[in-house]
Image (tube, rainbow, N blue to C red):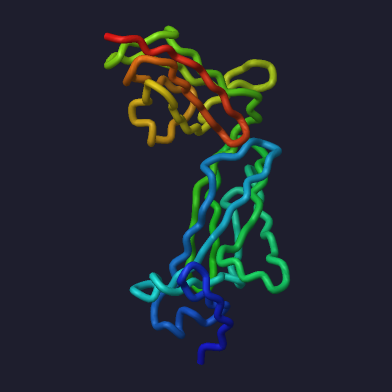
Amino acid sequence: MLACSLTLLTGACDFDLSDVTSALGGELIIEVRAAPAVEVGDTLRMSAIGRPSGVMGLLLYDRLLDGEWAVSDPRVATVTRILPPTGDSTTPIHALLKGHKPGTVRVTVSARGARGEATVRVVPPVAQLVATPARDTVRVGDAVEVAITALDSVGAPVRDVPFWTETQGGAWVHESWVQRYTPAALRVIGRQPGDATLTVTFRRHVTRRTIMVVGP
């Protein structure tokens, strides 16, 4: 018997069930979502969502209200579940991961014999990101190398900090959709004459550099 509470969410049915797996005749699939890194002393909000396997997973969510969070090494980071407010019908469950010392942990969510996991890196506190181009101009069709580093409060490099890039204006970053880790060297390619802005981001840390693109 499906003792369920139904809520329509973006066209899908949201089941608040502990026996969803057996009721639907399939396995429970758990997906854990998290940013790739958090700094020591900071917290990272994570989420997890459940679906039954097979075609039913395209239509139904399992709210995982009985899901258990855990980390592979509590010396590196600890996780605390965020309880949903009374009457809340949001599909994902949430937790806060707090970084304690540099390292890497696997964060898992387990429910009814199923398990999902994500890997999160804990890095030293970052004070700033720095983008240093080899030169401030580039010709259309040519490339200029830009070094990306992360620094701590005393200016020492912090390794393995993940970052994303974005460009606006007359240039683009080669393979900009690939997440990189500091230190790194980017190739910024001139597309059309004019100023181009390169933006580099890690969580709340953002740096921007302007590169002038000139004609061939």
Q: Residue 49: percent from the left, percent from the top?
A: 51, 64
Say which residue appears at 38% left-offset and 72% top-offset: 53
From the viewer's perspective, is residue 104 above or below residue 107?
above
Q: Residue 50: percent from the left, percent from the top?
A: 49, 67
Say which residue appears at 56% left-offset and 63% top-offset: 92
Count of numbered labels shown in the rendering: 0
In front: 20, or 208? Answer: 208
Give the farthest residue toward the right: 86
From the viewer's perspective, is residue 3 above or below residue 70?
below
In front: 8, or 114? Answer: 8
Say which residue appears at 56% left-offset and 23% top-offset: 207
Q: Residue 85: percent from the left, percent from the top?
A: 72, 67
User: Which quadrant: the C terminus?
Assistant: top left
In front: 143, or 3? Answer: 143
In front: 121, or 151? Answer: 151
From the viewer's perspective, is residue 80 above or below residue 180?
below
Q: Is residue 132 left or right of residue 177?
A: right
From the viewer's perspective, is residue 102 above or below residue 34?
above
Say which residue appears at 62% left-offset and 50% top-offset: 45
Q: Residue 78: percent from the left, percent from the top?
A: 66, 50
